[in-house]
Image: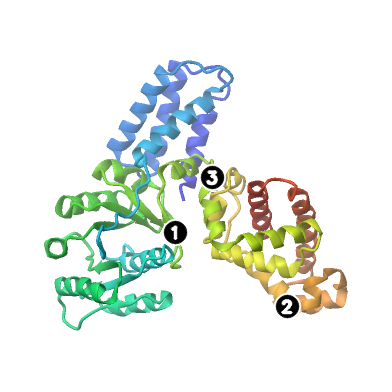
């Protein structure tokens, strides 16, 4: 996500490194490079022009800061302006004063509405809400079955009827929520392959009949400027409250994310980065700006880690590291915990500087599979005491895991190096331990 844009912006700032201060000439050159980078990322032309004009004006007005290089000064100016076009403030879901809260989901077919509906239900359930899903996509073949299948995975009820009447489904789902004490109703509406009058009329009628507290427009970020144009048309008809960007982990240049808020003047509320139902995050403009500029997103990373680790687990692990008792069984458990946090490539992008350092390395979500296979092929004794792993045992493990003896040896060597580093890092603060540990675990997967 945003790797190409990050690289080009970094190059633009790097061009200032040989200058002692910001001048009219290097401002013009850098702004030109930034505008080209934004347009290459498929950012709306008017948004890109407005952005660079404001950056230029701010740079011209700013004085020389003592002890701050021109590159750092320019980075700060661009960072502040990125936050502005991304929405400035984080905005979450607005809940009704009197339940149930009604959330209407709209968007084109293929944008990921149904999957997002289930993801949102899981997210809200984790926030101690009791959601009910309404299957109002009554036209697409198997749409209702898809929603029910997803809902079953998270143990959330779905309201549906046999008739193709989306308005009735929405209205009756709200009544069902009141009967069953569900405090949130999420309505999955039908999409089309393009914006058409029938779809717009139906969504507008649902809005009029049920008066939702929140209307979320789901858009496929991979469609670039088409996503922005579609959002504009939807907003003119149904005046939605927020945007959901899906498939940000795909081959996307980021233009939709950087354009849509400025064009429709509505906040991005959620971003989705995968098919798994836990691959959903609230959108924070400042955190996204940091990631675009290669600063990482440590806050989001720690939040993800906190969902998987409790204090007792952390203390137990810390004691093992300090006493040098951290073994391969513990390591396997940590790998599995990290995988629950989401896409490995997404986690790498949250580590400051790591994305740049690994830009030529393909970070695969399956990178840990050989490691898991090797450790799983060991006996309990071998995991707890790797010193017993002689040549014959290593050959057996390689054969059982579908790897080579060389790969087994390399893993054991890296594990010992990591143990030494982790013991050293245990003297650091909790934040430092968490970040360094994640970097070490990531490096073992490549």
Residue occupying the point 54% across, 30% down: 14
Sequence order check: which comes first, mark 3 or mark 2? Answer: 3
The residue that disc 3 covers is 296
Report crowding for label 3: few under 14, some 14 to 19, many 20 or more residues within 10 A (C-alpha). Answer: many
Sequence order check: which comes first, mark 2 or mark 1? Answer: 1
Report crowding for label 2: few under 14, some 14 to 19, many 20 or more residues within 10 A (C-alpha). Answer: some
Q: Secondary structure at mark 3?
A: loop
Q: Quadrant of residue 313?
A: bottom right
| Residue farthest along the front direction in this orientation | 98
Q: Are marks 2 and 1 in contact (CB under 8 Å)?
A: no
Q: Secondary structure at mark 1?
A: loop
- Which of 29 and 430 lies nearest the eye of the viewer? 430
Asked if residue 136 can be seen in this view, the reply is no
| Residue farthest along the bottom direction in this orientation | 162
Q: Is residue 105 left or right of residue 12?
A: left
Q: Which mark is residue 377?
A: 2
The residue that disc 1 covers is 273
Q: Is residue 411 left or right of residue 340?
A: right
């Amino acid at each position: 996500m945003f790797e190409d844009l990050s690289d080009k912006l970094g190059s633009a700032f790097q061009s200032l490194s040989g200058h002692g201060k910001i001048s009219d000439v290097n401002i013009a050159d850098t702004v030109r490079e930034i505008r080209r980078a934004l347009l290459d990322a498929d950012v709306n032309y008017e948004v890109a022009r407005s952005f660079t004009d404001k950056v230029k004006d701010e740079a011209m007005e700013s004085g020389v800061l003592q002890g701050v290089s021109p590159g750092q000064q320019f980075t700060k100016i661009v960072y502040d302006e990125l936050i502005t076009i991304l929405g400035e403030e984080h905005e979450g879901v607005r809940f009704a004063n009197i339940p149930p809260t009604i959330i209407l989901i709209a968007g084109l077919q293929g944008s990921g509405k149904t999957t997002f509906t289930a993801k949102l239900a899981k997210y809200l359930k984790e926030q101690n809400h009791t959601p009910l899903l309404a299957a109002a996509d009554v036209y697409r073949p198997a749409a209702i079955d898809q929603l029910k299948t997803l809902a079953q995975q998270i143990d959330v009820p779905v309201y549906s009827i046999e008739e193709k009447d989306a308005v009735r489904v929405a209205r009756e789902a709200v009544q069902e929520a009141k009967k069953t004490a569900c405090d949130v109703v999420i309505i999955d509406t039908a999409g089309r392959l393009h914006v058409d009058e029938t779809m717009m009329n139906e969504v507008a009628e649902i809005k009029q009949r049920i008066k939702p507290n929140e209307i979320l427009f789901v858009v496929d970020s991979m469609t670039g400027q088409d996503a922005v144009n579609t959002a504009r048309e939807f907003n003119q008809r149904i005046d939605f409250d927020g945007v959901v960007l899906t498939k940000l982990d795909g081959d996307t240049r980021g233009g939709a994310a950087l354009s849509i808020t400025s064009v429709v003047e509505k906040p991005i509320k959620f971003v989705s980065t995968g098919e798994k139902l836990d691959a959903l995050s609230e959108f924070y403009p400042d955190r996204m700006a940091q990631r675009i500029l290669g600063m990482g997103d440590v806050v989001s990373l720690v939040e993800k880690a906190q969902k998987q680790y409790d204090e007792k687990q952390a203390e137990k692990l810390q004691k093992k590291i300090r006493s040098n008792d951290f073994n391969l069984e513990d390591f396997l458990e940590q790998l599995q915990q990290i995988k629950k946090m989401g896409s490995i490539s997404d986690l790498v992008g949250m580590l400051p500087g790591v994305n740049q350092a690994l830009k030529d390395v393909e970070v695969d979500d399956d990178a840990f599979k050989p490691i898991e296979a090797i450790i799983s092929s060991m006996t309990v004794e071998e995991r707890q005491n790797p010193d017993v792993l002689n040549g014959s045992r290593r050959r057996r493990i390689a054969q059982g895991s579908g790897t080579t003896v060389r790969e087994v040896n390399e893993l054991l060597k890296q594990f010992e190096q990591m143990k030494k580093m982790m013991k050293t890092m245990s003297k650091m603060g909790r934040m430092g331990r968490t970040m360094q540990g994640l970097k070490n675990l990531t490096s073992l997967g490549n």
